[in-house]
Amino acid sequence: MIGHHIDDATVTDILTRLGLNVTFADNSWTAIAPSWRFDIEIEEDLIEEIARIYGYNSIPNNSPLAHLTMKGTPEKLLEANRIRMALVDSDYQEVITYSFVDPKKQSLLHPQQEALILPNPISSEMSAMRVSLLTGLLDTIVYNQSRQQNRVRIFEAGLRFIPDSNAESGVRQEFVFGAAIVGDKRPVHWENKSEAADFFDLKGDIERILSLTSIRHDLQFVAKQFPALHPGNRLRLCLMAKKLVLSELFTRQLCKSLALKANRLYVKF
């Protein structure tokens, strides 16, 4: 434990001089502490006493040596940090939102998805576990818009929680990415005219990230119905049985309920 071997005879002598009743057999010591040594209760207490009497200066200061083998990572896997860096390079900022969300807002975004309700929540606005990152991303946009930050480009990586009777503890945890953009395509500058970001900007960012992998040739965009989105403004990206929802416009009623000043762009993957 201390990283240094001390002779058996020395250990026995030290413990005896400390007033302990010591017996040594089968390469182990049995020590009974005297009544006045109430500070000796566990094995680590004995080791500390031995090291103290033996002398800390007598214990050589050597770095531990371990033979480690690097674990190989297949090139076909794209690490989460690489995705983060790709989004940052595209002028996104990472956010971290609560896993607890307002069940009323979440039901507006995912009316057909059951959520896990907490029995003892922090507050009524944080009483449900999120089933996607969308609720937190939209709340972040509203927060920034309320402070005159109209150009927002954000992303988040985190867990979503899906009730599943076959999963451990009755909930399935899935690691997902989400991103949202709103406002001008580029930062305000006197050389450039103001140009609002559109659906294809978001689509291009996702294609740029997926181009880092070998599955970029397996992308397929198809129409998808989504209750929270405006009719005719939703698209699904199918990728080897994995589904990615791209949306351009939310319904006006939803924007009003969430206090969004304009329709949003959103992607989840």
Image (cartoon, helix red, strand yellow):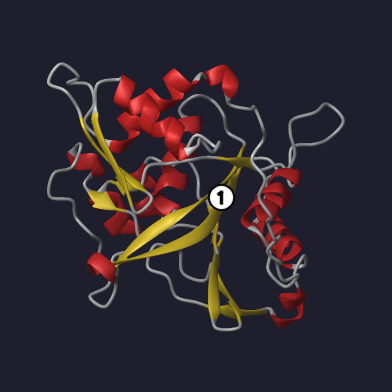
Seen in the picture, residue 81 relative to 215 is either above or below; the reply is above
Residue 151: percent from left, percent from top: 62, 36
Is 200 in front, or is 7?
Answer: 7
Judging depth in this view, the residue of 119 and 233 nearest the camera is 119
Residue beneath the point at 76% across and 70% down: 75
**Residue 203: which quarter of the image?**
bottom right
Q: In which quarter of the image is residue 204?
A: bottom right
Q: Where is residue 143 in the image (x, y as percent from the top left)?
A: 44, 32
Splitting the image into 4 quarters, where does residue 74 fall?
bottom right
Residue visible at 44% across and 39% down?
Answer: 8
Q: Residue type at mark 1?
A: Ala
In the image, what residue occupies the spot 34% across and 34% down?
A: 44
Residue 114: tell me if it is visible: no
Left or right: where 76 falls relative to 225: right
Which SS class for mark 1? Answer: strand
Q: Where in the figure is residue 13, as x and y percent of width and height?
A: 38, 28
- Classify 237 as above or below 266: below
Q: In this view, does 90 lie to the left or right of 162?
A: right
- The C terminus lies in which quarter of the figure? bottom right
> 10 Å neighbourhood of mark 1: few (<14), some, or many (≥20)?
many
> Is residue 253 at least partly visible in the picture?
yes
Residue picked out by circle 1: 180
Residue 40 or residue 242, whichever sits in front: 40
Q: Residue at x 71, y 67 (%)?
A: 72
The percent coordinates of residue 191 (x first, y second) are 87, 30
Tally the marks.
1
